[in-house]
Image: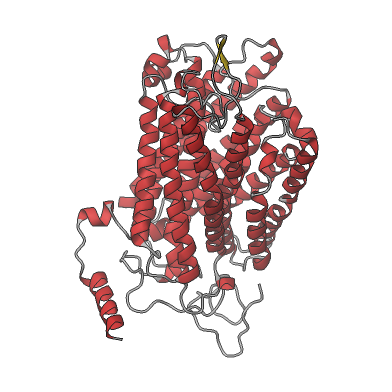
Amino acid sequence: MSATADTHAHDDHDVHHHKETFVTKYIFSQDHKMIAKQYLITGTIMGVIGVLMSIMFRMQIAWPEQPNVLFEALLGKWAPEGVMDADIYLALVTIHGTIMVFFVLTAGLSGTFSNLLIPLQIGARDMASGFLNMISYWLFFVSSVVMIISLFVEAGPAAAGWTIYPPLSALPMAQGGSGMGMTLWLVSMAIFIASSLLGSLNYIVTVINLRTKGMSMTRLPLTIWAFFVTAVIGVISFPVLLSAALLLIMDRSFGTSFFLSDIFIQGEVLHYQGGSPVLFEHLFWFLGHPEVYIVLLPALGITSEIIATNSRKPIFGYRAMVASILAIAFLSTIVWGHHMFISGMNPFLGSVFTFTTLLIAIPSAVKAFNYITTLWKGNLQMNPAMLFSIGLVSTFITGGLTGIILGDSALDINVHDTYFVVAHFHLVMGISALYGMFAGIYHWFPRMFGRMLNKNLGYLHFWVTAICAYGVFFPMHFIGMAGLPRRYYTNSNFPLFDDTANANVVITMFAIVGGIFQLVFLYNFFVSIFYGKKAEQNPWKSNTLEWTAPVKHMHGNWPGEIPHVYRWSYDYSKPGHDEDFVPQNVPMKDGEEELHH
């Protein structure tokens, strides 16, 4: 008994009397809210680098062989007289894909909002382990630094595509980008996976063990369900990529032959035999497809919360939404083969993967219809967060429709590795997840920084981004159906593709305008942190617990007792209440029924 009392006294002492220095508060912080900001700002910086790369290689595709001052300034020896070298083109595509998928949309999105919202929305003082949380961020930071360092290696950064298929990634002598740049890529990803696993385990344990009194699993906001299931998928699938990376390092450095067989370089027979590059494809895509949903599910969870709040209506079909999240998580782990229809796969196995891939359309459609039904006849508050959430529903549907074509083995073979695939996954995963991230930032910025973002700049940011995103990726479907292959640094040598040249110029113009207008968001974000209008405690009149905590940040989230929960998180416009929202910590009235979700 006395030991317990001592522990509580020690906890109180830590919370109330421990003096924080600049280093412990802002750098090596164990407070989940500060770690969320660290993830967000690091992810934003990586995003700027990734977008800049995409603008550079789009300019190369639109105006091949033409001297460009930007190339000369940024690429140096890789752009003699301003003309981009063919090797660096593939390296830019590789690092752009890696940064955007892993460092921005996985760590930037999940790391930010899982850290910010899980303790606040379930009613916990902090994560289960603040120390592990801090370690997971710093591993992410180190992996980001290593990835950036790889850009400055003399022989060039990794250049095997973001999927790093052997033999380009397994033979250091294959090309410039297969040397030290590739090694640093693998080291960076190994550190990144360690970070992701530590974070995911922390999220899972926190949701299971630290919910406040009354917060049953069926009262959790859909955001928490999405973050929780995302963490579970990560724990299952990320170790497989780690094993693939380690085996690849063995092939590169220790003479093994897991992924190599019968290789000839300039007529010389190498000693490798018995391995299979297709084995690497299986290992990579066993993570690679769940990764789509590791990126997408947090964005869909954020959208559920924002659409319900700004429609002033209960979310439609709460239990169906939870079931669809669980179904997507399960199905996402058994569909990886649809990336490999042209790898010589047995046609029967191809038909199995076609079936499981088309099956995942059902829970995805459930989510889309539930969003639309929640919006239907709602009292819509069209703020920037709501616009980005509706934009996500739009891109999720348009991108998902082309997924039906790519999921069917007979149809996929015709457009595999063309711009049709690029258009599909950028819309359904890249743009949708980015919209979810922007929506989350606009919605929870007051919770993070105690200030409001400028709404008018938010509107400008949304409309230009939405128009440019469709301007970039919609025409890509057509040049893909015309057969234009992806990853070629110029198509001018093929008269067959001359008709696509103008389309590529239009796509690039939209990409440049869309990229430049992200500066509006960055200006709004960083200026509002210091000079934005001060936020009230609950600016969106929302029901979830994070808005019951004081605006001023404190380690422990709530002074005194943690609020208890008496209802689910979507009691909007409930009959019998004066306000059109009823926070979760408001007790039920006599005779009031809890809504059946």
Colouring: secondary structure
Residue 146: give x, y in percent of width and height: 37, 35
Residue 409: give x, y in percent of width and height: 77, 36
Residue 571 appears in the picture as rendered: no
Residue 11: give x, y in percent of width and height: 28, 73
Compare residues 115 and 337 and report the one nearer the observer. 337
Residue with the most extreme bottom position: 590
Residue 377: give x, y in percent of width and height: 68, 63
Compare residues 568 and 88 and report the one nearer the observer. 88
Residue at horizontal 46 percent and vertical 45 percent from the top: 193
* Above or below, 229 relative to 6: above
Name the quadrant containing residue 16.
Answer: bottom left
Residue at horizontal 25 percent and vertical 79 percent from the top: 9
Residue at horizontal 31 percent and vertical 86 percent from the top: 1
Residue 41 appears in the picture as rendered: yes
Compare residues 400 and 334 and report the one nearer the observer. 334
Residue at horizontal 36 percent and vertical 79 percent from the top: 561
* Above or below, 494 relative to 247: above
* Above or below, 256 relative to 464: above
Left or right: 527 in relation to 225: left
Locate the C terminus by quadrant. bottom right
* Above or below, 59 relative to 142: above
